[in-house]
Image (spheres, rainbow, N blue to C red):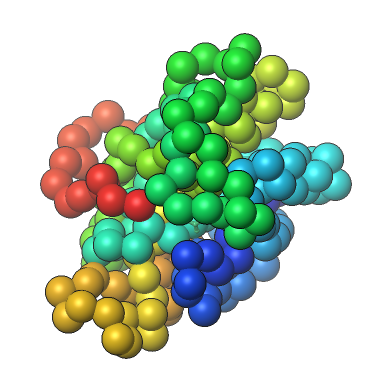
Amino acid sequence: MKILVTGFDPFGGEKVNPAFEAVKMLPDKIAGAEIIKMEIPTVFSKSWRAVEDGIRKYDPDVVVNVGQAGGRAHVTIEQVGINLADARIPDNDGEQPLNQPLQPDGDTAYFATIPVRAMVQNVRSHGLPCSISYTAGTYVCNCVMYNVLYLAAKKYHGLKAGFIHVPYAMEQLIGKDASTPGMSLRDIAASLEYALETIASGGEEAMGPVHGGQGTIC
Ligand code: PCA
């Protein structure tokens, strides 16, 4: 199995993006699956096209895109991408779409096709907090999640995809309000690794409840 894992470049005045920093720390193989790592731009129009270039180049079985959700306290696995771009701040190219559909002919929303609940449970079973999120926001992360699921539905049949949001890394908290949550890059990377392990080992979606935690800020 081949899993394409992407992380964004820094945005919003941050010096690093913990998503790509943690992706870089992942091993090249997880539970027998090949892990292909790629950095993508935090730009509405370019981000998902870069992922599509990666899909064409590497022909992965699964795509997992990873982004920063500053203000969340731990790693969250996204359940749904919505057909809406509504940017709070301009992206890295100055684009700021407001209240626009991402794909005029796309569904209102697509659910992740990776085993979200089983992934959350596996991360938790290794002693790290993790939860499902029911909103990936309306910025570039949601744009990528939605568009990759749209591409899988329309063009790359059989491709599975989903999105993981990670909190600020500890070093990003310096100078921020003392109540701002974050995690060490090592724990973020470990959480990603356990989440990907579930996919790599062919984990089926768990049916049990995995409530608790958080997932509204990004
Ligand atoms: N986080 C942003 C976009 C890039 C990133 O890492 C988001 O949550 O939309």
> Is 138 on the left or on the right of 206, as rendered?
right
Residue that appears at 27% across and 29% down: 207
**Quadrant of res 23:** bottom right
Residue 27 at x, y = what percent?
Answer: 61, 71
Number of numbered markers? 0
Q: Position of residue 154 (x, y in %)?
A: 69, 18
Residue at position x 28%, y 51% from top?
217
For the point 41% across and 31% down, which residue is it?
A: 80
Place of residue 184 in the rendered image (x, y in percent of width and height, measured from the top left): 36, 79
Residue 72 shown left or right of residue 164 in the figure: left
**Residue 16 visible somewhere in the drawing:** yes
Q: Nearer the viewer, residue 201 or 23?
A: 23
Taking the image as shown, residue 195 lies to the left or right of residue 178, namely right
- In the image: residue 95, left or right of residue 55: left
Given the current orientation, which residue lies at the most extreme right position?
A: 57
Q: Nearer the viewer, residue 63 or 92?
A: 92
Write the residue at 52% across / 15% down.
Answer: 107
Residue 121: in sight, yes or no? no
The residue lying toward the viewer, choosing from 57 and 140, is: 140
Residue 15 position within the rendered picture, expressed as x and y whole percent measured from the top left:
52, 79
